[in-house]
Image: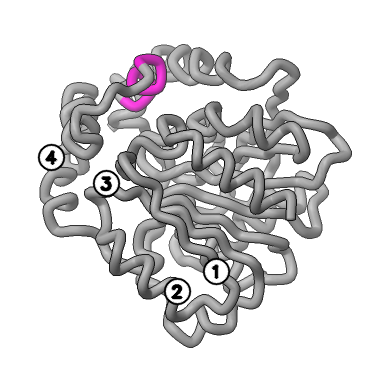
Amino acid sequence: MGSGYDMDGFLAAYDKVMAKWPAGRAATTVPTPFGTAHVNSCGPLDGPPVVLLPGGGGATSASWYAQAADLARTHRVLAVDLVGCAGRGAEAGDRHPRTVADLVDWLGAVLDGLGLERADLGGHSYGGWIALQHALRAPARVHRLFLLDPTTCFAGFRAAYLLRALPLLLRPTPRRARTFLAWETGGAPLDPDWLRLQEAAAGFPSVSKPVTGPRPAPEALRGLDMPVLLLLAGNSRALDTRRAAARADALLPRAETVVLPDVSHHALPQGAPAELGRRLTEFLRR
């Protein structure tokens, strides 16, 4: 995998989505033991930092373009391409992440490289799982936590979702990426530039497989003493929204759970309703 991959096409699609970010955006590279991390940023340099993690697979930090401008009015927005996933942080390090502890070390190294002792932290899907794991294992570094339809945090994947995703996982192609996204989003209109990036990311050559793991233990979630905003997609085909909401409400001591109607898992965060931006900005300004 990767010898015939169109990296130039991927980078062109990535940059086209990044052009939707606010003016004054900047790109930073941060060395970590697991390779160079790529961070897109905007907002006031002296603003309180908010770190954003995208979903896995073809998602990248560029996908936060629809939320970046609102968040950047009050915060320094720092969106990170995930290790082991599609993105610009492609330089390999001395180690490959293999465990949850490795992911926590990776994100800790990114925060160190950005000069952040503590930050607001949020993630979508797989990025939400990483954000939650980091908050559980390094709570002193997380001020507030927000999660957008996070997978394997409060509910497992739906069987139908995994079945539909299997062809894309086994042999990723642009056509399979488009077909899968059309199914999961119910045919909802998607930004064509963002969709092109998802297609271009299919088959992205990676030095390591994304780390996966079980849902956090109930006792760990009960001990998470920080404000948490859980935003669930009402039309998600990835997870059981009701089950996830009930588990989060039962276990997290300081959680606010909101179900966003008429939006699917993969339409987040770029194609979400205005309520998502309003909820995020209110949560981070408290």
On screen, residue 68 above or below 169: above
- Please tell me which residue lies in front, 206 or 25: 25
Q: Is residue 213 visible?
A: no
Q: CA distance from mark 3 to mark 2?
A: 19 Å
On screen, residue 240 above or below 263: below
Q: CA distance from mark 1 to mark 4?
A: 36 Å
Q: Residue at x 69, y 50 (%)?
A: 284
Q: Position of residue 73 (x, y in %)?
A: 75, 32
Amino acid bearing label 3: Asn
Stretch of the chain drawn in magenta: 192-198
* Residue identified by numbered label 4: 167
Q: Is residue 153 magenta?
A: no
Give the mark toward the camera: 1 or 4. 1
Q: CA distance from mark 2 to mark 4?
A: 34 Å
Local packing at callout 4 (Cα closer than 10 Å; few below 14, some 14-19, many 20+) is some
Give the mark toward the camera: 2 or 4. 2
Q: Residue at x 46, y 50 (%)?
A: 148
